[in-house]
Amino acid sequence: MTDEEKPHFIAMDAETQVEHILPQTPKRGSQWNADFDKEKREEWVNHIANLTLLKRKKNAKALNMDFDEKRKIYGGKDPSKVISCYDITKELYSDYGKWDEKSLQKRYDFLYEIITPILHIEGQEEEYEDDFDLE
């Protein structure tokens, strides 16, 4: 599958990788270090709100770049032709001009609204909500 195709089902293969938007190891002197202290970075780096999907080649380009540069990779040279086939990645380009704690919380809320109805088993919502602090 090329990255320009729009998949109906995403097969996690060697070409599909999980991208950490806030990188696991930001470059020294990067904007990430100014925006997130070590404690906040550790809190958010592996959080679902900070993850997206990219093809291997695009993920290799994005690596530890600042968000402005990553956003260009997510969006491509021509913003009207977003290059990722994954809607979850496209929305990063269209919906976020910066990546900070407020953006992470907004994305978490967005993903939570999508995921929880799928994961909840009818009639067991209260049981699960008592067992897990979902917020």
Image: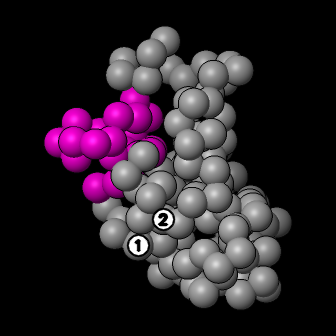
Tell me which label, 1 or 2, sits earlier in the chain.
2
How many residues crowd around disc 1 within 10 Å: few (fewer than 14), some, or many (20 or more)?
A: some
Give, as a single range, the part of the protein colored magenta: 74-94
Q: How far apart are marks 1 and 2 (CA)?
A: 7 Å
Q: Mark 1 points at which residue?
A: 98
* Whether residue 109 is visible: no
> Measuring 70% from the left and 20% from the top, which residue is drawn there?
14
> Measuring 40% from the left and 35% from the top, which residue is drawn there?
84
Magenta run includes residue 79: yes
Q: Tags 1 and 2 in contact by the CB under 8 Å rule? A: yes
Residue reaching furthest to the front? 29
Considering depth in this image, is 126 or 45 the residue closer to the camera? 45
* Whether residue 132 is visible: yes
Amino acid type, residue under disc 2 in the picture:
Phe
* Residue 91 image point, x, y percent: 36, 51
Q: Is mark 2 on a helix, strand or loop?
A: helix
Residue reaching furthest to the right? 131
* Residue 6 image point, x, y percent: 36, 22
Amino acid type, residue under disc 1 in the picture:
Lys
Is 29 drawn above or below residue 71 in the view shown?
below
Is 12 drawn above or below residue 99 in the view shown?
above
In the picture, residue 47 is in which quadrant?
A: bottom right
Q: Mark 2 points at which residue?
A: 67
